Amino acid sequence: MARRGSYAKGVAKREEILQRALDVIAREGFRRTSVKDLAEAVGLSQAGLLHYFGTKEQLFTEILRKRDELDNAALGPAPDAPVGVEDMRESWVDVIRHNQQVPGLVHLFAAMSVDAADPEHPAHEYFTERNARLRASLAAALGDRLDPRLDPETAGRLLQAVSDGLQLQWMLEPDLDMADTTEALLDLIIPPAQDGR
């Protein structure tokens, strides 16, 4: 019995850490937030905090996973709902618009994605799986509305590349409206719906 209660407390503490870390990084920024800051935010020592995650890189990877989970729950369609091109378009732009409200998390994502190019990095698997899943989801949603000059997989890759690239540009030029720019691209690759479609 004690083990089960201890395990549940550990899971709850881990969730508390991730939730608090999302808030702190979104507010303070990735570069201005240390493991010590995150530990203090949840009443732990640095060693106590890393006990739940192993390393700093694993902690930050789990923060990104939690961000994805919360964004998908808040901004995406219901998991069992069919995703059409209009739903995908609206959700995609909503996520990008939301990202403009959390610059610290965007910076974390961008920095980690570069480091994760190394196959030995703890976030490598997270990014490769996330990218493949995201492209497949985008490709499936685009369906027959896609400009015939593009295949769905290429279109999904382009949307993802533009999103990632716009985040880098936005970090350098905070006045850039990533959502409007993304909508302009979507207007080009997804022709308007015809009557009866």
Image: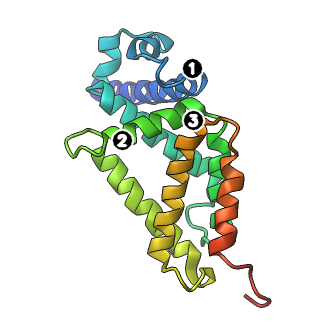
**Left or right: 132 in relation to 85:** left
Of the numbered discs 2 and 1, the one sitting upstream in the chain is 1
Residue 29 or 125: which is nearer the viewer? 29
Placement of 177 over or under 33, stated as above or below: below
The picture places residue 163, in percent across and down from the top left corner, at 55, 53
The residue singled out by tag 3 in the image is 171
Instruction: Say which element carries label 3.
Output: helix
Placement of 173 over or under 79, stated as above or below: above
Q: Mark 2: few, some, or many residues within 10 Å (few <14, many ≥20)?
A: few
**Residue projecting furthest to the right:** 195
Of the numbered discs 1 and 3, the one sitting upstream in the chain is 1
Comparing marks 1 and 3, which lies closer to the viewer? 3
**Distance between the alpha carbons at the discs numbered 2 and 1:** 21 Å
Label disc, if present, on residue 81 of the rendered structure:
none
Instruction: Say which element carries label 1.
Output: helix
**Left or right: 68 in relation to 179:** left
Question: At 46% from the left edge and 9% from the top edge, which residue is drawn?
Answer: 40
The picture places residue 61, in percent across and down from the top left corner, at 37, 37
Of the numbered discs 2 and 3, the one sitting upstream in the chain is 2
Comparing marks 2 and 1, which lies closer to the viewer? 2
Q: Mark 3: few, some, or many residues within 10 Å (few <14, many ≥20)?
A: some
Q: Mark 1: few, some, or many residues within 10 Å (few <14, many ≥20)?
A: some
The residue singled out by tag 2 in the image is 114
The picture places residue 11, in percent across and down from the top left corner, at 39, 31
The picture places residue 50, in percent across and down from the top left corner, at 31, 20
The residue singled out by tag 1 in the image is 28
Amino acid beneath label 3: Met
Placement of 194 over or under 4, stated as above or below: below
